[in-house]
Amino acid sequence: MRMQQDCFEQFKQVTSNINNKSIIETHSEDVKKAFSYLYIINFISKKVELKRFFNTTYYNVSYSCLIECFTLLLEGYPRGSALVLRSSLENFVKSVIEVVGQGTYSINDRSYSVNRQTLDNIIENEYPEKYKALFKRTNAQMHNLYGKLSGLSHSLTPESQNNLLKFFSDISITSKDNIDTVVEKFLSILEYIFQASLLVARTSLEVWERGNLEEVVSFVFGKKRSASTLTLFTP
């Protein structure tokens, strides 16, 4: 209950600083859900017993990008938000490779697809069987969304590609469809990053008190998803 109240108070404070309130009003529940994910991801990454799983420059950049994405989206810049969201995914996967691979797997600076395959290899080689299917599926889902975000962040009409004035005009237009699309993709990526973060920290979470773990997963997951997650992390 204290976490819920703290999250709510922080949400009010953060959104009070947003100049354009229209997206907060039209996407109220989604915005609150997104902030809840941001809150709980930050919560687990700062826990003393879990810090070592998130103590990388890649992770810090990834989380900063999530915050920036949230702000840009609420201010009505969906293309910019999508671009920053891609960067968050890129850096998050690199962080996972560094942490879970324990420095024995190389990180590709340019290719997300190569890093996705490297992470699959790590999961196959380093993880207990019961975690493999979920972790690989989450990795594939992140890769799929990365491709979709690439198309959105670079989408321009044929006219704007060839006309400077039309380019600036297109950039300034806030499309409802683009806002809806990025909100949807943002929530999915937050879900996958949270799920992957739990899997990265699984050796510590396996020995957590069940009540503490339940409080964390139920913060954003429903009853059925929370129950299956608790079962998965039971030693």
Image (tube, helix red, strand yellow):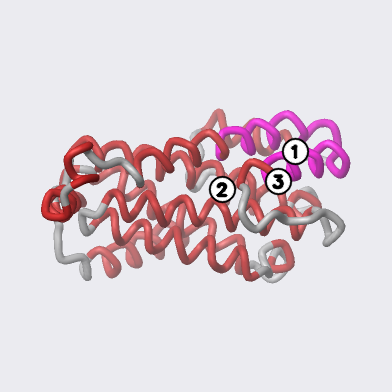
**Which is more N-terminal, label 3 or label 2?**
2
Residue 142, quarter of the rendered image: top right
Q: Quadrant of the C terminus?
A: top right
Q: Amino acid at mark 3?
A: Leu
Residue 120: give its label: 1
Helix, strand or loop status at disc 3 = helix
Helix, strand or loop status at disc 2 = helix
Viewer-side residue, 121 vs 19? 121
Residue 193: give its label: 2
From the image, give the main secondary structure of the stretch colored magenta.
helix
The residue under the point 65% across, 58% down is: 109
Q: Which residues are magenta?
A: 115-142
Q: Residues within 10 Å of mark 1 (few under 14, many from 20)?
A: some
The residue under the point 73% across, 35% down is: 232
Name the spot of residue 121 as percent of width and height, x first.
Answer: 80, 40
Side of 156 relative to 217 (left or right): left
Q: Residues within 10 Å of mark 3 (few under 14, many from 20)?
A: many
Residue 19, quarter of the rendered image: bottom left
Viewer-side residue, 136 vs 11? 136
The residue under the point 83% across, 61% down is: 103
Q: Which residue is mark 3?
A: 199
Name the spot of residue 182 as percent of width and height, x first.
Answer: 33, 42
Q: CA distance from mark 2 to mark 3?
A: 10 Å
Q: Quadrant of the N terminus?
A: bottom left
Q: Is residue 43 above or below residue 164?
A: below
